Image (spheres, coloured by chain):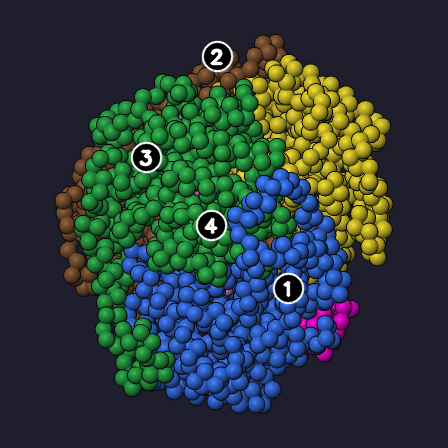
Chain colours: A blue, B green, C yellow, D brown
Amino acid sequence: MSDYFKDIAPIQFEGLNSENPLAFRYYNADQVVLGKTMKEHLRFAACYWHTFCWNGLDPFGGGTFERPWFAGGTPLQLAEQKADAAFDFFTKLTVPYYCFHDRDVAPEGADPRESHHNFKHMVEKLAAHQERTGMKLLWGTANLFSHRRFMSGAATNPNPELFAMAAAQVRDAMDATHQLGGENYVLWGGREGYESLLNTNIGHELDQMGRFLNMVVEYKYKIGFKGAILIEPKPREPSKHQYDFDTATVYGLLARAGLEKEIQVNIEANHATLSGHSFEHEVATALALGIFGSLDMNRGDYQLGWDTDQFPNNVPELALTMYYIMQAGGFKTGGCNFDAKVRRQSIDAADLFHGHVGGMDVCARALLAAEKMISDSRMEQAISERYAGWGQTWAQDIMAGKVGLDALADQVLANNTDVLPVSGRQEYLENLVNRFV
Amino acid sequence: MSDYFKDIAPIQFEGLNSENPLAFRYYNADQVVLGKTMKEHLRFAACYWHTFCWNGLDPFGGGTFERPWFAGGTPLQLAEQKADAAFDFFTKLTVPYYCFHDRDVAPEGADPRESHHNFKHMVEKLAAHQERTGMKLLWGTANLFSHRRFMSGAATNPNPELFAMAAAQVRDAMDATHQLGGENYVLWGGREGYESLLNTNIGHELDQMGRFLNMVVEYKYKIGFKGAILIEPKPREPSKHQYDFDTATVYGLLARAGLEKEIQVNIEANHATLSGHSFEHEVATALALGIFGSLDMNRGDYQLGWDTDQFPNNVPELALTMYYIMQAGGFKTGGCNFDAKVRRQSIDAADLFHGHVGGMDVCARALLAAEKMISDSRMEQAISERYAGWGQTWAQDIMAGKVGLDALADQVLANNTDVLPVSGRQEYLENLVNRFV
Amino acid sequence: MSDYFKDIAPIQFEGLNSENPLAFRYYNADQVVLGKTMKEHLRFAACYWHTFCWNGLDPFGGGTFERPWFAGGTPLQLAEQKADAAFDFFTKLTVPYYCFHDRDVAPEGADPRESHHNFKHMVEKLAAHQERTGMKLLWGTANLFSHRRFMSGAATNPNPELFAMAAAQVRDAMDATHQLGGENYVLWGGREGYESLLNTNIGHELDQMGRFLNMVVEYKYKIGFKGAILIEPKPREPSKHQYDFDTATVYGLLARAGLEKEIQVNIEANHATLSGHSFEHEVATALALGIFGSLDMNRGDYQLGWDTDQFPNNVPELALTMYYIMQAGGFKTGGCNFDAKVRRQSIDAADLFHGHVGGMDVCARALLAAEKMISDSRMEQAISERYAGWGQTWAQDIMAGKVGLDALADQVLANNTDVLPVSGRQEYLENLVNRFV
Amino acid sequence: MSDYFKDIAPIQFEGLNSENPLAFRYYNADQVVLGKTMKEHLRFAACYWHTFCWNGLDPFGGGTFERPWFAGGTPLQLAEQKADAAFDFFTKLTVPYYCFHDRDVAPEGADPRESHHNFKHMVEKLAAHQERTGMKLLWGTANLFSHRRFMSGAATNPNPELFAMAAAQVRDAMDATHQLGGENYVLWGGREGYESLLNTNIGHELDQMGRFLNMVVEYKYKIGFKGAILIEPKPREPSKHQYDFDTATVYGLLARAGLEKEIQVNIEANHATLSGHSFEHEVATALALGIFGSLDMNRGDYQLGWDTDQFPNNVPELALTMYYIMQAGGFKTGGCNFDAKVRRQSIDAADLFHGHVGGMDVCARALLAAEKMISDSRMEQAISERYAGWGQTWAQDIMAGKVGLDALADQVLANNTDVLPVSGRQEYLENLVNRFV
Ligand SMILES: [Co+2]
Ligand SMILES: [Co+2]
Ligand SMILES: [Co+2]
Ligand SMILES: [Co+2]
Ligand SMILES: [Co+2]
Ligand SMILES: [Co+2]
Ligand SMILES: [Co+2]
Ligand SMILES: [Co+2]
């Protein structure tokens, strides 16, 4: 047991009248919404990296956080202390899931074997913590972007030996995820892109990436991992351009590699906005393309051009995202992982709880709003009425490929009738949404 | 013959020492570069819409241009005057090609049949002008975004009758393009996207778009059109989100519709930068994906968030784009169409020439720079050396699918050797480029 | 009386349980909040231009709205019909104020005198409508950006004759504002900036602008206008760069012209975000600099790089803006003018009401949230506690200029004590805000 | 003498035909341009921080550079090794100037006194290096943003004790700059701004900043420092909003503090573009406002929303900036400091030279282009002709305040003449510029 959080009591639902800043006012784990408990719907996860690994460093300044597990022991001892603190945090926060990168939980060793053994050692510790606490793993992943060896990419590195080193790390991370009962395995290509076209062969790198993704899927079947394989789109940063720019781009990548039925997306709110889309756009697009998997829940800052990974705090913004997901049946293997970090000036242990508690309550409010939208049904009706014309036989024939350009054109000239446009009613619909948030 | 340009003499190549602002200093049509004449390589086109239709209007003010064909006759008379002026301009400018939308050349009629007949009438006039002048059509297209009936989209309209009206317009535009010997047919989906998710069914609209594209391809084969079908990606504007966001997104759309071998992209510089990419990125991506078709040559303003369609004027920026295209063998059916307009304060007839002459010279300089890059070969060598490791047998086996994650991981642990990163040499390469521009 | 809105009943407050989409659920004009009625606090205005003049045109397509006053009469007859419809709309909407540009209400004439007389004529009509309905004028302004004569600027035009024509229009607009009892006079410099530095003398144009502003202030005193003179900052669009970029820039302009006590800012939400700031930043900055005047209430789209002027619909975003204003004592001469337009697909008369009713309710919710924030007082306390150290005598001496760099540096070295940072508690504060919205 | 650069020979001018990538092709220090040598005009400086302190770390990965002075000694020993290497680099590069932050050259100590003594110690070493090599200091500055104590600002910290600690560091840095003959002293407010308005009192912080700037100016006079005091504008990053957003904002800050004659700006290209302006805009604005001081020469990436600090490599872009400066008489105390860093994949010692040599050549080309623009004079004439009307007596009377709004308006109505707009000729001017680059 860590004592870093000893002053924090387990977080409880206290309802709207609570003045306790470290209580839930909306997130009531066992409250039934749309046929399931909030806990079952939201499948909250806390992440290892931002909360337990980041020290507050930014490009213009050093660390501001002073966590006890940052110094004062061997790397493995510190990793164990960190795990103690992490599970203490997770359980006090009452999230059912957590997520990690291999290098978050175990230190990089002096050579590949030592890294491998460090990781194996810590996975045993995590297994024990899970056993002890009932915590579950939402997803695992491999960090293929922090070590200098991957400065020019991992799967898309110009050097095949680094592709092999990436493969080794991913095998270990997939094995660990499988062993720990993880429900998904995630790939984020922080350096899978380029800094300059001048030293880059895009075509070759896209082929490498396609091959790597296929290897991951093959290995999933080989070991019998039943979870989903997910890619997390991001347009840039750290790379100038990343090959997994956004959901539509990832769809193209997957189609090119023949994997559009095998891999889904883990959509992060801040990555969505950095790519020039709203969060709900990315989710709605993934649902439309059949590749929606999971969420990295956070928010960016609309005035900043980089990934700020702040906790979500705007209910109206999140409510639509939640609505689209719930309307489509809710999460399957995915969930709401807080890929979010407290600001670098938020240096107290309590701040970590403030960030997550606030974020969880915002998600719960969004879920409650989505429930209202669904039971009200006017939003859904507005859409179905607008496209109702496509239910006509002649229109279905178009979609079925029975009618060609020529026949349609003839019909238009034959009838010589024009079509009057009808109002899109956007303001009415926006006001309608505001009834629910 | 129009007399709007009567004070402008045909533009000639006068070389570097010319002080004539309306002469080419670099573009020497018959000069051989990389095995072809500049004219054959660059395949310049001027566009109808910006130069002959736009009156200088912007969202905050009315027209500033006073062209003689804007008023003072019946719509068809004015369309004929406009065509006279346009061909006068094209020939004085010495571009071999032009491009148009159906509604640029012929007025919208009171009903579909009248529009159809107006267009047919003007296509005959264009044919006669082509015959008379030797001008050729680089591509034709249909304007499916200006009329209010298409305010909610054309192929992706919620109303199938508008899908049919779009089909009618496209058939006419394809027929005209075929009749006029056009070398490509272009689709730009100005309203194929959404303003608000609240009234949009993305999945249905993507299916509509896929079906429409297939109809276009089917019709191409039906009429024996030998040119290429092109989509012009654009991320937004006028729509909040357009389904043809960028080249990678279009690739995904095409793959989903089974058309990635049938349709290519017409890449516009300003659309590239609005989508968060450099122009050369879009071109290199299209080449890598096998869907590069043609260019809409212009530039945006890096501080402005909308499509400014200015004439290209930065040689170093354009040189890389030209290099990638020439390295890949140059244009096939495509060319360099100036989708560019003079600023709304540039109200004189001569300004139209200044814009194009400057743009053509910038392209010629970029082509000359590309020639130097190719003959020098150090840029290409730097890439091939960087990826040389992938030529090894074991690395080729990875790409060929003969080796899996497991085997690679075992090999890494067996050898336990780490890999040292090597410099990406970006600054060296950037300096190398600067030798050629 | 116009009959364009004959199907719309006057909008009433019906409270939260109302299912009537054209009723207020929050805006209860006579409800007292923070010591005044909502009506007195919010001082709502509807604008003439977007709702009565714009026809739905965008850069890629023609008008979509078909208002009866757009065609079918002489320009002055249509202007009168428009005024009838406008006052019908204002009174049904129950906003107490309206705003206009000179050219919104009266047509441009064939020459300056005709324009002058047209405007005079319509000002009489407006006066009669005000008299009849009790409507008041929040502010008037002159449109110095739509006519082609102003394509290169008005006050900052390279031609002094256009400076004079701008002066003539502004005098008329100030006279009209004065005559109609307007509470403010606004200047928006849509073309007061540049398209290209290549034809621009920034220094001269800034001097021209400074002189023009001084002339406006001199004239205000000359005619005894008691309202405020306001500048509306905007970073760009239509100009590439506008001299009134944002609030801080306007402060500098005013200081350079000696007018920082004479002119205030009219802050528009969408202009704020286009300039790289949040709305609340612009408001808080103006309050800090002592130049806060009024609001143009709307919202932009965070993914779009141009001024979309949508109706506000995000309560949490607006609540902070309202909080800062109310905390500083509320509006004086200013108010909430809806510089907002329905989407171009929202073609029905009712859509104009949906936009405004939704916007007014969102503002009312924001005001109610601000009231809660103020009565709770924890937000204010957090700030005052954080800066409490500056209340110490030695710290006040610094601010008073009694202590120099040298003395402070000596003191630090003498004491040799370091200072521990304290948490900024941002997440705690964000959660606190979420209690009130 | 460091041996890190032992394989690099001093960089020499070899002219256009040189194939040596580590030679100047354009920068010929002693070549006379516009009446001075290139060396005298450009006043190149290399910076300490990016080249000698940064280890290649980014927010997603650790260091990639392995410099000998990063490890293996006491902090002061390493600082001395670093200084040896730095002066070795400066002299081989043949830049006449360098720039530093206090903490770049000397390690932070355990307490203020130790930091003070470390710095004093290293300033003596720098003095000796300057004496030995003839290198000069372009400017010094204090790093008030990297240490965690300054996480909430320095001059604008809510805690006055941190204001005092900032004062102590600045006094030392000003003393050192004075002692080392520095020609300017620079202030960059990396944390002088806010992360969240919720914990910020903007008005108080602006007052603190104004007072701090006044203290700096008072101290300058006290010690008899003859150089210029400069502020380096930047819109955001690391802070969400910085008070020195851009040149116009800084002008307002200075005017509010009564310092617009005392402090000038150090304009960085990448900061310009992050603030929504072109580099030449910021320079032209500073010249127009009389506060132009010096340049931080680099470039950003137009697709990236953060400060990439790349070496300049686009001659056309830089040429205009250089033209405006030269047209205004050239640099006074300022110069061209490379606030630029090699990419994190550029890990070789030689890469540091490639970056700077390329950047210096680009600046030299831009200077040569500016010379051509000035001798040609058509660019200047186009401007003076465009504003010629303001030379008329009646127009000068306007500017002199002799004519009011009323008189001008009367004159317009009396004459009732309209003014025809004239072409802005932007395309002609852009083509003209392209003759010189
Ligand atoms: Co994420
Ligand atoms: Co992120
Ligand atoms: Co185009
Ligand atoms: Co365009
Ligand atoms: Co406004
Ligand atoms: Co606006
Ligand atoms: Co800098
Ligand atoms: Co920088």
Which residue corresponds to mark 3? B96
Which class describes the residues within 10 Å of circle 1: few (<14), some (14-19), or many (20+)? some
Identify the subunit bearing mark 3.
Answer: B
Which residue corresponds to mark 4? B219
Which one is in front in this view, the residue at disc 4 or the one at disc 3?
Answer: 4
Q: Earlier in the sequence, mark 4 or mark 3?
A: 3
CB atoms of marks 3 and 1 within 8 Å: no
For the C terminus of chain B, the image quarter is top left
Against A426, residue D349 (above or below) is below
Whole-Å distance between the Cαs marked 4 and 2? 69 Å
Identify the subunit bearing mark 1.
Answer: A
Query: What amino acid is found at the position of numbered circle 4 in the picture?
Result: Tyr
Whole-Å distance between the Cαs marked 1 and 2? 68 Å
**Residue projecting furthest to the top:** D414
The magenta segment: A13-31
The answer to whether the beta carbon of the residue marked 3 is less than 8 Å from any atom of ligand 3 is no
Query: What amino acid is found at the position of numbered circle 2 in the picture?
Result: Thr
Whole-Å distance between the Cαs marked 2 and 3? 52 Å
Which class describes the residues within 10 Å of circle 3: few (<14), some (14-19), or many (20+)? many
Which one is in front in this view, the residue at disc 1 or the one at disc 2?
Answer: 1
C105 to the left or right of A221 = right
Main SS of the magenta part reads loop
Labels 1 and 2 in the same subunit: no
Which residue corresponds to mark 2? D393
x then y, percent, for residue A275: 49, 57
Against D134, residue A261 (above or below) is below
